[in-house]
Amino acid sequence: MKKITLIVLLSTLSTGIRADEYHTFSDKSGRVIKAKIIKVDLRSNTVTLKPENKATISVSTDIFSDEDQAYIRQWQPTASTQPQTSTNEKRVLTATEVKEIAKKYVSDKKNEDWKISKDSRLYPYPYEKYRIKSTDLGKVYDNGFELEISIALFPLESNADYSGGQTERTGLVLLTPDGDVKYDSFLNPHPLETICPYINSISGDYLHKRPYSINEFITTMKKGGVPTFGLTSNSNREEFGKEALKIIEWLIDNGETHDVTEPKVYVPSKVFDKLKDSLKSSKKNF
């Protein structure tokens, strides 16, 4: 079917195509087509072409000459090669796509000797060593899913009085509209997953008048793209409390649609509801 489509296009294309945007492709039978590349998928050996005044088509790269196959492999996308879409048009993953991506991701993790980020703090003192025992799929959301892992814990030699243990943890994996993994709680958590627990911890220190670092607080907020309002390294305790409340209010109002980098990926509403409850609890401590 793809071959027939290509033959029809070859016979109907008009001339006068701009050379800086279009390339002349030849198939192995000698037929030619002038078109620009929109997308290349080397995994499936397919290329999406856009002839002038014609709809895009996807065909196998195998039908083209060796020279054109080499050209396709070296092609890099630019703004001019992207399809024009409405500014209101947004790619949305289907439930089936999310589930398939989730299943593959979990399967890959089961077969990998992967390491948890130290920032995740998934295992408590004195268990400073661990081994991932199992990896399973949890809840599936519109733009991501939960990754459940079981961790075997091992104490340091200096804490020989402690025996080994086990703990279970659930992390959140979030996807871009193209289906790529952008955030993983265990490897690269969403900014809110770092900021909200951090605020909760600092609020406890503030309430009980334990030591805390305003500079570290400011750095953590800025790293996560959260405004710090009038808070400075010279702020006193009362000023810190007032500005922390402003930050918490901002997160409650804007957190559900907050991300620092493109493409924007947001935590699911049900997950944010839990984070918001944590923020409201922290608010009472300032």
Image (cartoon, grey):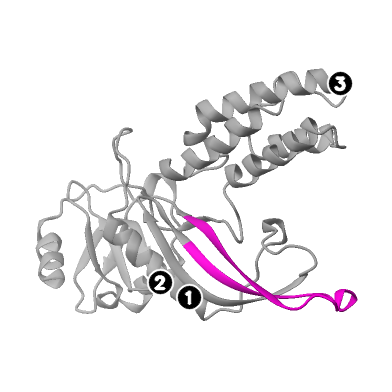
Q: Where does the N terminus fall, quadrant-wise?
A: bottom left
Q: Residue at x 78, y 69 (%)?
A: 128
The stretch of residues the image draws in magenta is: 147-173
Which circle marks residue 104 in the picture? 2
Which numbered marker is on residue 108? 1
Could you say whether the residue bearing mark 3 is in a helix, strand or loop?
loop
User: Which structural element holds mark 1?
Assistant: helix
The tag earlier along the polypeptide, 2 or 3, is 2
Mark 3, Cα crowd under 10 Å, few <14 / some 14-19 / many 20+, is few
At x 24%, y 63%, the residue is 58
On screen, 102 above or below 194? below
User: Can residue 264 be seen in the rendering of this structure?
Assistant: no
Q: Amino acid at mark 1?
A: Asp
Tell whether position 218 is magenta: no
Q: Secondary structure at mark 2?
A: helix
Which one is in front, 26 or 235? 235
Amino acid type indicated by mark 2: Lys
Q: Nearer the viewer, residue 44 or 55?
A: 44
Q: In the rendered image of this protein, does residue 136 appear above or below residue 180? A: below
Q: Which residue is mark 3?
A: 236
Q: Is residue 171 magenta?
A: yes
Say what amino acid the circle numbered 3 marks.
Answer: Asn
